[in-house]
Amino acid sequence: MPERIVSLLPSATEIICALGLEDRLVGVTHECDYPRSVLRLPKVTKTLIPTDASSSEIDALVRDRMGAQSALYALDMDALEKLQPDLIVTQALCDVCAVAEEEVKSAACKLSSMPGVLNLEPETLDEMLLCIRQVGVVTANEARALAVIESLWGRVAAVVARSQRVAHRPRVALLEWLDPPFSTGHWNPELVQLAGGIDGLGTRGEKSRMLRWEQVIAWQPEVVLISCCGFTTERTMQEVGVLQGVPNWEEVPAVRDGRVYVTDGSSYFSRPGPRLVDSLELLAHVIHPDIHELPEWVQQPVRLADYASVG
């Protein structure tokens, strides 16, 4: 049973803490910020992306480094050696989001503690819940994992039951980047469907994809929710000015009806952990506020129509 765990993924950190294992965490990434108590833990990664870069600059930097097969994140081997982990939890789903799996395996072989490496790679909501059980099994905490999964499934089922009563399923654009625009992928198109909407830009179980604004306009979404990956709501609000330059943006039904929203992309939609269910509840509230109340623990999204400067 591992007693000294290093998490190289914010969603893994959230899963570990949801299972009541925070006391076994000895190191996390520079992006791990939930629950807030993990901020005290040593950081074993750093990013090579400037914190003050714009969306377009970040996109260009990511493309350049990925094209050159150059890392976006760096491991602090000295810190890892000092922490002496016996388990490292990582992922191979997205090299943009975390340290590459091969680098983690290579690092583990060099550590004197010879830790095991657990790779989590969910692409759907079901698979995220299975990852919770996987962490529970590896940490000899399966009973707690099954209880957490049952609770999360209950909340999902409640959203689905309410969504079945809707008379109209609106067209939804769930965007994870603005400059250039990206649709969301993996589990998110599924969340749209469960919440009572239709996602015509993303595909369940597949990666997010870059779009042209013409494609977004052509979809004529009735609801737009912007959740920029890795950005807080406040950080995303610094980027929404790009919408003013999009041809025919004002003719989109969601814009005309004041149904364009911004939410925290660090907390919701981008991390395949327990808060994907929070994301579902948030999305359901945005799409059908008359039948889905926003839980008190979920952040209220920002409605752009309330900010004259961004239309």
Image (cartoon, rainbow, N blue to C red):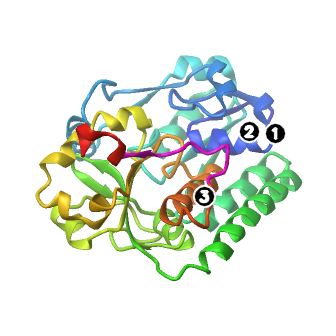
Residue 212, visible in the rendered structure: no
Q: CA distance from mark 2 to mark 3?
A: 21 Å
Q: Which residues are magenta?
A: 294-303
Report which quarter residue 18 is drawn in: top right
Q: Amino acid at mark 3?
A: Glu
Q: Nearer the viewer, mark 2 or mark 3?
A: 3
Q: Nearer the viewer, residue 236 or 260?
A: 260
- In the image, residue 299 sits, relative to residue 131, either above or below, namely above
Q: CA distance from mark 1 to mark 2?
A: 5 Å
Q: Residue at x 48, y 46 (%)?
A: 301
Dot 3: element = helix
Q: Amino acid at mark 2?
A: Cys
Query: Percent from the top left, x then y, of residue 70?
Result: 29, 38
Q: Which residue is mark 3?
A: 281
Report which quarter residue 153 is drawn in: bottom right
Dot 1: element = loop
Query: Percent from the top left, x then y, of residue 217?
Result: 21, 66
Q: Which residue is mark 1?
A: 20
| Residue at the limit of the structure toward the right, as seen here | 143
Q: Amino acid at mark 1?
A: Gly
Q: Which residue is mark 2?
A: 17
Tell me if residue 155 is in the magenta stretch.
no
Q: Residue at x 43, y 50 (%)?
A: 94
Residue 24, visible in the rendered structure: yes
| Residue at the limit of the structure toward the bottom, as seen here | 167
Dot 2: element = helix
Q: Nearer the viewer, residue 31 or 83?
A: 31
Q: Residue at x 38, y 44 (%)?
A: 96
